[in-house]
Amino acid sequence: MKITLTLHCPDCQSTKIKKNGKKASGKQNYLCRNCFHPFIGDHALTNKGCHSGLMKRILLMLVRGIGIRDISQIEEVSIRKVLAVLVNSHHVITPLKSYYDRLETDEFWTYVGNKGKKYWLIYAYERQSSEIVAYVWDKRDLKTAKRLREKLIKPGVSFGCVLNSILSASLSFLEM
């Protein structure tokens, strides 16, 4: 029985691929003859967060209304990876409803360069539908929390209450 595997270059999608030695880890390295980009095939990657089609699948699931935790379990990647794809997509979120009875806020952080330069993603979502209503990406302070409120109010979204376990003092203005 012979198994045929067709490889595509992750940059130019060409099928003109040749073997290009092995990595120190023992994985087969490939070279695109079209754009001369070296890469490791998706079939040999051990880190599932590096697969070439992952970002597209995560964005498709987010658009379909699947929750962040569910996507994390389906794709077997971390919640941070799913949120990073959301942040880096440059997608403008338009809320589906004009009124939400209850919104919840959550956050995660990463650093740029060194651990002293922390940046936070703070987002508001509705738990029942797993819809992300608004998000901001900045430092963890009152200014960032106010930007989240502006992103909620700007498109005409109103809400009954906001539940939060983070920045409780800073985000208390959301309930005004």
Image: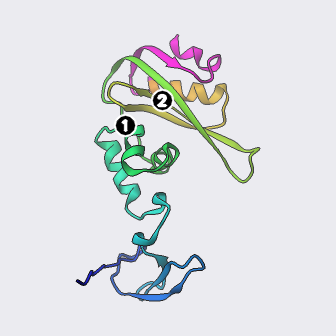
Disc 1 or disc 2, which is closer to the eye? 1
Q: Is residue 130 above or below residue 169?
A: below
Q: Which residues are magenta?
A: 153-176
Q: Amino acid at mark 1?
A: Gly
- Seen at 72% across and 54% down, the residue is 113
Task: Give the crowd class for mark 2: few <14, some 14-19, many >=20 residues within 10 Å.
Answer: some
The location of residue 56, given as percent across then percent down, is: 36, 56
Which image quarter holds the N terminus? bottom left
Distance between mark 1 and mark 2 Cα atoms: 20 Å
The location of residue 83, given as percent across then percent down, is: 48, 44
Give the residue pinned by disc 1: 67
Q: Quadrant of residue 142?
A: top right
Q: Are marks 1 and 2 in contact (CB under 8 Å)?
A: no
Q: Is residue 96 above or below residue 100?
A: below
Give the residue pinned by disc 2: 151
Q: Earlier in the sequence, mark 1 or mark 2?
A: 1
Using residue 58 as the reference point, say whether residue 137 is left or right of it. right
